[in-house]
Amino acid sequence: MRGPEPVRKGPLQVAGLGARWPAVALLVWAGFASIRQAWAEHLFASGRPEQMRRALELISGRAEFYLGLAEVAERAGEDPIPWLRQAAVLSPADASIRIHLGLREEIAGRVAEAEAQLLEAARLSRKYLPRWTLANFTTARAGRRPSGDGRMRRWRSLTATDGLCLNSAGVSARRRAFCSSESCRRGALC
């Protein structure tokens, strides 16, 4: 009677990795990716424009990097809007990016784009800052266009759904439940 055949080991079995080699390769890749991410964040945190751009080359999908480069461009007297637009594309649900972009569009004289960004910010976030910024933008522009153009009405419809109430100067906000004005209870400005 013959004994068992000798086991022949392939190249992976000799190394002792066997079926575990994909897991080891994944761990090595994850380690390198983690180091790359940490290095990019270190470069970005330096605050120097050339290193911030290098960080963006390493990790291009971070909206924070584009926001930082927009700030650097603004300090240098350059146009920050392209950086802000890219940040808005990467983080479409972030209302603060839309507010920042809307304000910069207004400064650049592109009022329609500014209004669109601020309306989008108010739609994305039910918090105070997007509504307040939109109210300031709308009331500041109210004297420069005919009153029947519907922009204030659009803003009121946005705020009425959330119960935000502003006085006619747009300087204070309070909930509809605390407002005594009949027009506020109907959703109009009080």
Image: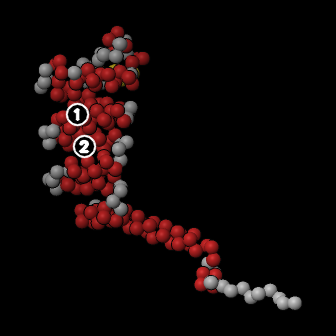
Left or right, 181 with respect to 31, comes to: left
Residue in the foreground of this view, choosing between 148 and 180: 148
Disc 2 secondary structure class: helix
**Among the two numbered marks 1 and 2 on one chain, the one whose residue lies closer to the N terminus:** 2
Locate residue 165, reporting x and y percent: 33, 21
Locate residue 98: give its quadrant.
top left
Q: Viewed as shown, does residue 138 lie left or right of 17?
A: left
Q: Nearer the viewer, residue 73 or 111?
A: 111
Compared with 38, 127 (above or below) is: above
Residue 170's disc number: none
Q: Nearer the viewer, residue 38 or 113?
A: 113
- Where residue 20 appears, x then y in whole percent? 61, 73
- For the N terminus, the image quarter is bottom right
Q: Is residue 169 visible?
A: no
- Kindly identify which numbered label has been placed on residue 115: 1
Residue at 64% x, 81% y is 13
Placement of the C terminus among the 4 image quadrants = top left
Q: Residue furthest right?
A: 1
Q: Amino acid at mark 2?
A: Leu
- Assess disc 2: are there few (<14), some (14-19) or many (≥20) residues with their C-alpha within 10 Å of its C-alpha: many
Residue that carries the numbered disc 2 in the rendered image: 101
